[in-house]
Image (cartoon, grey):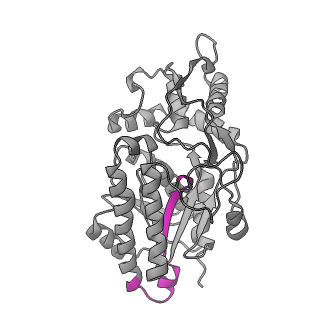
């Protein structure tokens, strides 16, 4: 099998204007790859996420829907795509509970369309170009369901999704597997744990708590705050994704974790402690005094954790951020310093988060 390492690739990257996708664009451009970004620019995808990305590689943004077969096919052909990477997804559990239809349309039907387009493109290739082609499905640990107090998810864990979001992602993963085993499309799937870092849309736990704290509003914690997640910095996640493409075996799945299990309450308390240092309140009280417990979300999985020893062993995966608190402090500093970005994306999204952006105090 031909190696995928080192040589610059032409990449069609869906969802590249979102949080994880834009951070991958930054990494790939630094490594010299050419990226064609296909993004519908919905509430969580913004051109501003791509500002300032520079390097030996280059990128181009195309606004469009991953369900648009003619558009996807034309991009694959026009740009002689080597890798099709599917970062595009509806990904917020709360939104999937209140409105599951768009999750079905994007995460299932969208994935199906990409696989069909990838299959037609793959069959049109020959020689070395065909050998190096890959389809990458970005997935989540939530497809595995909920863990008890011990153990970790791995590549052999049975799928047991518990929310409309995770069920739709599980369906996309199954399609990618089927297109490999039935049609021999060289697919690879990666399942990651909770990401954090710069440019994450403020509906997710960490940026939501940071911005609620800075707005002097309550910090709403679901249930008793005891739900446990494993946290991976987005840069570490994307390094793992790139390694999966370079060193991974078609048809296989690779789990990528942060080895940083924390319950939600402890994460919020860590955010408060760092904010107390970086941006003290005027009244000198700790941000912890703003923590408020709210009714738990339906079907809230209790614990996630990933065993990524296979990725370490077979891909050479290593984490830059070995301490969660180090990455968290960097992330909080980024949000404090980047109100222009926050204001732009919130204005475009219509303020669709659980606090009034107009009351944010700088």
The part of the image, by quadrant, that contains residue 72 is: bottom left
Residue extending farthest top: 283
Residue 69 position in % (x across, y down): 28, 69
Q: Is residue 55 visible?
A: no
The residue under the point 30% across, 63% down is 67
The x and y percentages for residue 228 are: 63, 41
Residue 128 in the image, given as x and y percentages of width and height? 51, 86
**Side of 63 where 264 appears, left or right:** right
User: Is residue 78 shown left or right of residue 281?
Assistant: left
Q: Quadrant of residue 111?
A: bottom left
For the residue pair 327 and 170, the one nearer the viewer reads as: 170
Against 151, residue 252 (above or below) is below
Regarding residue 182, the answer to whether it shows in the image is yes
Instruction: Locate residue 255: give its quadrant.
Output: bottom right
Magenta residue check for 134: yes
Q: Is residue 206 above or below residue 90?
A: above
Which x, y percent locates residue 216?
Answer: 51, 18
Q: Residue at x 53, y 71 (%)?
A: 8
* Residue nearest the viewer, comparing 52 with 179: 179
For the point 45% across and 55% down, which residue is it? 167
Q: Residue 229 or 321: which is nearer the viewer?
A: 229
Q: Which residues are magenta?
A: 123-142
Q: How many marks?
A: 0
- Residue 255 belongs to the span the image colors magenta: no
Quadrant position of the N terminus in the picture: bottom right
Q: In percent of the image, x 54 and y 60: which residue is there?
A: 159
């Amino acid at each position: 099998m031909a190696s995928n390492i080192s040589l610059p690739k032409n990449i069609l990257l869906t969802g590249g204007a979102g949080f994880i996708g834009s951070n991958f664009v930054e990494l790939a451009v630094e490594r010299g790859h050419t990226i064609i970004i296909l993004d519908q620019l919905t509430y969580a995808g913004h051109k501003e996420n791509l500002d300032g990305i520079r390097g030996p590689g280059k990128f181009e943004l195309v606004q469009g829907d991953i369900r648009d077969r003619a558009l996807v096919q034309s991009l694959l052909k026009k740009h002689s795509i080597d890798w099709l990477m599917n970062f595009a997804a509806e990904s917020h559990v709360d939104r999937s509970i209140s409105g599951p239809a768009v999750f079905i349309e994007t995460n299932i039907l969208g994935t199906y369309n990409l696989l069909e387009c990838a299959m037609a493109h793959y069959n049109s290739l020959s020689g070395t170009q065909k050998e190096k082609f890959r389809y990458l499905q970005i997935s989540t640990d939530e497809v595995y369901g909920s863990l008890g107090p011990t153990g970790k998810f791995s590549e052999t864990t049975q799928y047991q999704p518990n929310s409309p979001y995770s069920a739709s992602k599980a369906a996309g993963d199954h399609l990618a597997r089927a297109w490999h085993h039935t049609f021999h499309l060289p697919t690879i799937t990666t399942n990651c744990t909770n990401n954090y870092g710069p440019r994450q849309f403020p509906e997710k736990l960490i940026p939501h708590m940071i911005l609620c704290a800075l707005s002097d509003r309550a910090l709403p914690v679901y249930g008793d705050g005891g739900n446990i997640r494993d946290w991976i910095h987005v840069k570490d996640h994307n390094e793992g994704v790139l390694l999966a493409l370079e060193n991974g075996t078609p048809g296989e799945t690779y789990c990528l974790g942060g080895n940083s299990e924390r319950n939600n309450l402890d994460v919020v308390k860590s955010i408060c402690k760092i904010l107390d240092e970086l941006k003290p309140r005027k009244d000198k009280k700790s941000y912890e005094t703003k923590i408020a417990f709210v009714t738990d979300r339906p079907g809230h999985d209790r614990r996630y954790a990933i065993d990524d020893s296979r990725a370490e062993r077979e891909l050479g995966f290593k984490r830059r951020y070995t301490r969660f608190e180090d990455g968290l402090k960097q992330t909080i500093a980024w949000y404090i310093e980047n109100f222009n970005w926050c204001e732009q994306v919130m204005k475009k999204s219509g303020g669709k988060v659980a606090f009034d952006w107009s009351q944010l105090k700088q």
